[in-house]
Image (cartoon, rainbow, N blue to C red):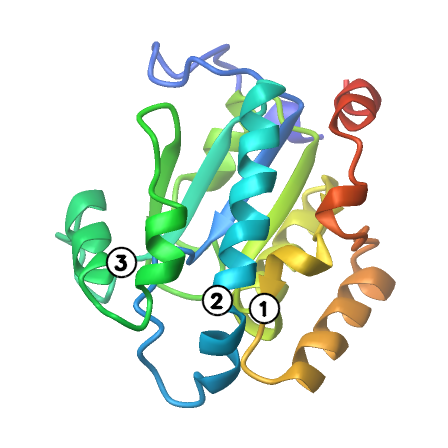
């Protein structure tokens, strides 16, 4: 059982939220400056708006938002340096400007593709008593897929709204969503069809 791994009741005041549901945003603070980015650049405006709306709905329901973002291969990087770098890059600005973290949000830096590898995310979710994760961001066939697998093996319920994730190629995007549905029992209905009130109630 997950609860048996940690005996303390809290993180000494560092994590004020307890929530059965969290919204996990993967690599949305992103300059989008990498090979094969044409599809992402095309999708960025609508993706940003879909995630922004989902985040706003989650905050209204008291669902915490956790950003998990690449540290740009520099362990001394901090939240603000990552945000400012990506915000100043023309390719990723449309995504970053719509999704800048608020003071109420959490931010975790990761060194590799999975949001759990060498990060405190697992500990954070345990102490928040999380049972359900809504997963959004980039990219569907890489960081989203690997993070979804980690969520599944932790016996957490998984939602990956199909309109709040994007990939480098449409075919890879569709295959990754199919794999998450089949292998990780992910619910991939669009975000607009997620009833957060019911989801909260069923996750208690």
- Going 76% across and 52% down the picture, which residue do you hit? 190
Residue situated in front as seen by the camera: 59 or 15: 59
Q: Quadrant of residue 30?
A: bottom left
Could you tell which of marks 2 and 3 lies nearer the N-terminus? Answer: 2
Q: Could one spot residue 83 in this view of the protein?
A: yes
- Going 87% across and 64% down the picture, which residue do you hit? 182
Image quarter of the N terminus: top right
Label 2 sits on residue: 44
Determine whether 134 is above or below 81 in the image.
Answer: above
Could you tell which of marks 1 and 3 lies nearer the N-terminus? Answer: 3
Q: List x then y, in percent, for residue 162.
A: 72, 60
Looking at the image, is mark 1 or mark 2 nearer the viewer?
A: 2
Q: Residues within 10 Å of mark 1 (few under 14, many from 20)?
A: many
Element assignment for label 3: loop
Element assignment for label 1: strand
Q: Is residue 119 left or right of residue 1?
A: left
- Going 71% across and 85% down the picture, which residue do you hit? 171
- Going 65% across and 48% down the picture, which residue do you hit? 151
Alpha-carbon distance for marks 1 and 3? 20 Å
Looking at the image, is mark 1 or mark 3 nearer the viewer?
A: 1
Determine whether 16 is above or below 1 in the image.
Answer: above
Looking at the image, is mark 2 or mark 3 nearer the viewer?
A: 2
Determine whether 82 is above or below 139 in the image.
Answer: above
The number of numbered discs placed on residues in the rendered structure image is 3
Q: Is residue 62 left or right of residue 197?
A: left
Label 3 sits on residue: 71
Q: List x then y, in percent, for residue 118.
A: 38, 52
Label 1 sits on residue: 166
């Amino acid at each position: 059982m997950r609860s048996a791994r940690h005996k303390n009741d809290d993180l000494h005041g560092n994590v004020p939220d307890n929530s059965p549901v969290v919204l996990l945003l993967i690599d949305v603070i992103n300059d989008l400056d990498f090979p094969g980015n044409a599809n992402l650049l095309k999708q960025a405006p609508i993706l940003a708006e879909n995630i922004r709306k989902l985040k706003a709905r989650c905050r209204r329901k008291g669902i915490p938002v956790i950003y998990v973002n690449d540290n740009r291969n520099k362990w001394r990087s901090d939240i603000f340096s990552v945000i400012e770098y990506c915000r100043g890059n023309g390719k990723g600005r449309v995504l970053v400007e719509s999704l800048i973290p608020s003071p109420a949000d959490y931010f975790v830096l990761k060194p590799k593709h999975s949001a759990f590898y060498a990060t405190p995310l697992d500990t954070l979710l345990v102490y928040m008593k999380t049972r359900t994760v809504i997963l959004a961001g980039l990219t569907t066939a890489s960081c989203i897929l690997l993070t979804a697998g980690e969520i599944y093996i932790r016996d957490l319920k998984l939602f990956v709204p199909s309109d709040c994730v994007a990939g480098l190629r449409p075919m890879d995007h569709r295959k990754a969503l199919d794999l998450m549905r089949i292998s990780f029992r992910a619910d991939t209905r669009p975000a607009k069809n997620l009833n957060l009130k019911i989801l909260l109630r069923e996750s208690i």
